[in-house]
Image (tube, coloured by chain):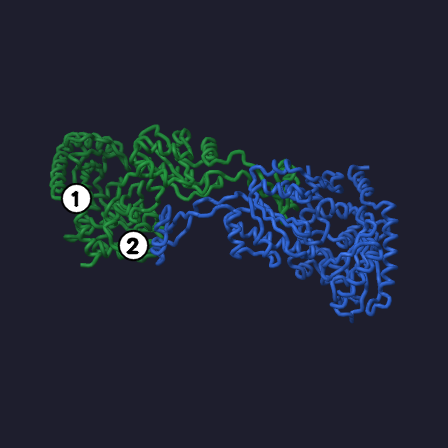
Chain colours: A blue, B green
């Protein structure tokens, strides 16, 4: 057995659910389905219940048991009515199973609860025929059916290996926080490439944009690229030719997967399947922060928002602040967002410097232009200049404010920074600082924030951890 | 009388030589010419003597009396022989007049001495017919003849006004130190434009490249530009159509003249005719240096060199150091050179900062390239990264050395800076520093250096002095 085969064998044992987990999930799923059937009986427009997701396809990995219970509605039910009904039915259902219902939001609301250690999601969809989709979840039953019809016996394990690999490499999850690979996408890739090792070999050779069209809906790669012009990875949905299953995958996550696949083949190791969730101490972070130019913003949310919406707002605001810092004259090496998904948020930026030069060059017009003498008059009190070099006038201007955090605060308060509408108020009140000790104090009471800061400072994807 | 006319009237009085000066110059010129005639009698190949330059044309300005005594040689005399003879004849001549001969070098050697407060230059030329020039000075007698034949009575005074204006504005002098306007060029411009005020009005409207062809040698402006493609100002020499009289004029000096002319017309003032040679104290310089990022190099010359050659070497080396500093990651706002023309030299640079950031971004290849895993291996010990953004790898690299002067010294010592051959040894031994107090100490014993530092820090051409 080669090193590669040996590693894959060991990985199989890690990703495979235990008997105990399997029995528990089976029990919860059966209870949930029969309870759901009872709940919808007599509800006008609620037609059926089904199990979807990884539990239905037996592609879930150890420690990740999830039951997605779908309630199928008649298309005549209004969107509003459906949202009301799913919250009612879902909440009752979770309570009956002994869980505490939480209302969550994706494209429309759904209800989540933890039952005996297993996450149960109660989700609404419309019973429609393709391609007459009404809501985003309507495709899910078709996805399940497609995967079940195409997955050969034993291939579930190959899906699990791929999911386990992607999870450990930090690219698994289609949510905005991750911008990575969904479970369904992983299943399609396994169907397409046959098994885990073949998928990895193919991915190691990927050069974006990559196109995969399992059902051959498009006549050529060119047609696919025309249909999805911006995507680095396009996997045409077998149940909907107009949809890219990999639409959520960012170029960065895709590139991380490519590199991880290359490095895994070069030197197979269990590190590509194991997650390291070490929480650093304050002292370790302080050492890493030495001599680095870190600016951070800390703020508290005014109102609770859906997780994905919050992450979207954070990331857009992070980009807006980043552009502002660059316009001010800083180089932003990296940036990151963190939130506890409830009330606290941190945006963090690594800069080349925390202060701008006190003086900067200001370029004037060529001397032969009409406004040359206006420039001279305007700047006659400059610290240096106006002088002439080549055909142009220049002066040296003094900056009154040079600190990154103070300059940024001014711009934010005067509304010159592109920040998501929903975060404007909290960010205008944010603590904006370059004080490392304050940051460490903030993080001292929050393991997850310390872990985030560690990851930010070390800046290596998990598969490159030393 | 308008403000403009009044200022010009007052300026006339400033630039016009005094009776005393005129009498003294006349006496010295007569003595020099008759002595020169005696010296060459019996010297084979020495044919004649003549007075050239501003004294011959009566276009010199107050305080600037100079006698250029030319010795005309037969073209059969070898260059070597001519150089030997002019040193001998010139030295004897200066001594006879009571001066101390100094051997100077331009295109070939000449002898200079100060006689009764007047500079006397004894220069060799070949007696040739245009365009059979052998040496650079052969044209001079023709220049004198041309100007005398074209200058109308009274126009000498217009030349003087223009020279006085250019001198006070810092653009007069064709030597490499200045890169400005020669006396002959000023005379041609006066002939071309008629009088001072008309010349100023025309110059205020100049937009480079400017072409002037007094004798109409070229059929069009386009032909002139083709013949002198790089020059911002082209004045075709009336005695040699292949020569640009303004070849020495840099774009910067030309632009300064244009701006000075504009500002003078807008607000006529005697400041455009007066030189301010204020020598600052150490305290004033210290105040100006506050918060500014100044790097300087101080060195002593190993051997004495001709003035123009030294200035050329200094300026080329200044440019080389400037490029090196920019390659290192500094922004150079301005730079300057100073020398006492004997032994001491200073190169000075104003930078945006005196230290580079401790960490800098290092861009790697896209992940899909073959060398991506080599990059990962090479940089696995980086302080941060390798990480992926978009399709590329990055790491943060630590710089061991960040100070501008130390980084520059390393590069100079390892021979990576483009420095004039003649200055390599002194510059490799130079004091390279960012220490302001050391600079002030150095300047405390040298008025001229303090004045240079003042001008550098204030960075305004003389006509913009407050």
| Chain for disc number 2 | B
* Residue A225 spot, x, y in % from top left: 67, 59
| Left or right: A448, with B152 as reference point | right
Can I make out residue B370 in this image? no
Please identify the quarter of the rendering in which residue A229 is found.
Answer: bottom right
Q: Which of A192 and B391 is in front in this view?
A: B391
Can I make out residue B262 in this image? yes
Q: Residue furthest bottom?
A: A76
Mark 1 secondary-structure assignment: helix
* Residue B272 spot, x, y in % from top left: 25, 50
Q: Residue B45 carries which label?
A: none
* Residue B324 spot, x, y in % from top left: 45, 39
The answer to which of marks 1 and 2 sits earlier in the sequence is: 1
Q: Height in image: A449 above or below A223? A: above
Q: Which residue is drawn at 76% across and 68% down?
A: A81
| Left or right: A179, with B24 as reference point | right
| Chain for disc number 1 | B
Identify the residue position indicated by label 2 in the image: B263
Q: Which of B238 and A266 is in front in this view?
A: A266
Q: Which of marks 1 and 2 is in front?
A: 2
Quarter of the picture containing the N terminus of chain B is bottom left
Q: Residue B56 carries which label?
A: 1
* Residue B160 spot, x, y in % from top left: 20, 48
Tag 2: Cα neighbours inside 10 Å, few (<14), some, or many (≥20)?
some
Mark 2 secondary-structure assignment: helix
Q: Height in image: B96 above or below A263? A: above
Q: Which of B47 and A87 is in front in this view?
A: A87
Q: Which of B37 and A139 is in front in this view?
A: A139
Tag 1: Cα neighbours inside 10 Å, few (<14), some, or many (≥20)?
many
Rounded to the nearest angstrom, the CA distance separating label 1 from label 2 is 33 Å
Task: Tell whether label 2 touches label 1 (CB within 8 Å).
Answer: no
Dot 1 and dot 2 within a common chain: yes
């Amino acid at each position: 057995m080669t090193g590669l085969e040996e590693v894959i064998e060991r990985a199989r044992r890690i990703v495979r659910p235990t008997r105990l987990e399997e029995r528990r999930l089976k029990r919860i799923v059966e209870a949930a389905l029969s309870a759901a059937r009872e709940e919808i009986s007599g509800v006008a427009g609620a037609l059926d219940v089904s199990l979807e997701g990884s539990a239905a396809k037996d592609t879930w990995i150890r420690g990740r048991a999830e039951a997605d219970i779908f309630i199928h509605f008649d298309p005549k039910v209004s969107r509003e009515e459906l949202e009301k009904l799913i919250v009612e039915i879902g909440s009752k259902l979770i309570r009956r199973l002994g869980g505490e219902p939480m209302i969550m939001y994706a494209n429309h609301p759904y209800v989540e609860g933890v039952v005996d250690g297993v996450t149960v999601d109660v989700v609404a969809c419309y019973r429609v025929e393709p391609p007459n989709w009404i809501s985003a979840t309507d495709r899910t039953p078709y996805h399940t059916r497609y995967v079940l019809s195409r997955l050969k016996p034993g291939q579930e394990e190959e899906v699990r290996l791929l999911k386990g690999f992607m999870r450990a490499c930090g690219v698994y999850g289609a949510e905005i926080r991750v911008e990575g690979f969904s479970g369904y996408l992983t299943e399609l890739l396994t169907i397409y490439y046959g098994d885990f090792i073949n998928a990895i070999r193919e991915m190691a050779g990927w050069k974006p944009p990559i196109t995969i069209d399992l059902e051959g809906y498009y006549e050529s790669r060119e047609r696919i690229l025309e249909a999805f012009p911006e995507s680095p990875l396009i996997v045409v949905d077998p149940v909907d030719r107009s949809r890219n299953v990999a639409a959520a995958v960012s170029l960065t996550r895709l590139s991380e997967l490519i590199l991880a696949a290359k490095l895994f083949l070069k030197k197979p190791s269990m590190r590509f399947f194991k997650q390291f969730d070490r929480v650093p101490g304050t002292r370790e972070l302080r050492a890493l922060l030495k001599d680095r130019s870190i600016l951070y913003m800390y703020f508290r949310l005014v109102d609770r928002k859906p997780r994905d919406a919050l992450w979207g707002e954070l990331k857009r605001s992070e980009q807006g602040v980043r552009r502002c810092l660059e316009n001010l004259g800083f180089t932003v090496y990296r940036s990151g967002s963190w939130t506890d998904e409830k009330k606290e948020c941190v945006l963090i930026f690594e800069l080349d410097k925390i202060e701008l030069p006190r003086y900067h060059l200001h370029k004037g017009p060529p001397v032969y232009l009409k406004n040359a003498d206006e420039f001279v008059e305007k700047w006659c009190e400059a610290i240096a200049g106006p002088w002439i070099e080549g055909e142009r006038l220049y002066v040296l201007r003094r900056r009154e404010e040079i600190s990154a955090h103070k300059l940024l605060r001014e711009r934010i308060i005067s509304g010159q920074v592109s920040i998501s509408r929903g975060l404007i108020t909290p960010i205008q009140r944010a603590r904006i600082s370059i004080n490392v000790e304050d940051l460490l104090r903030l993080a001292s009471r929050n393991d997850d924030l310390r872990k985030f800061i560690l990851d930010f400072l070390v800046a290596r994807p998990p598969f490159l951890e030393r």
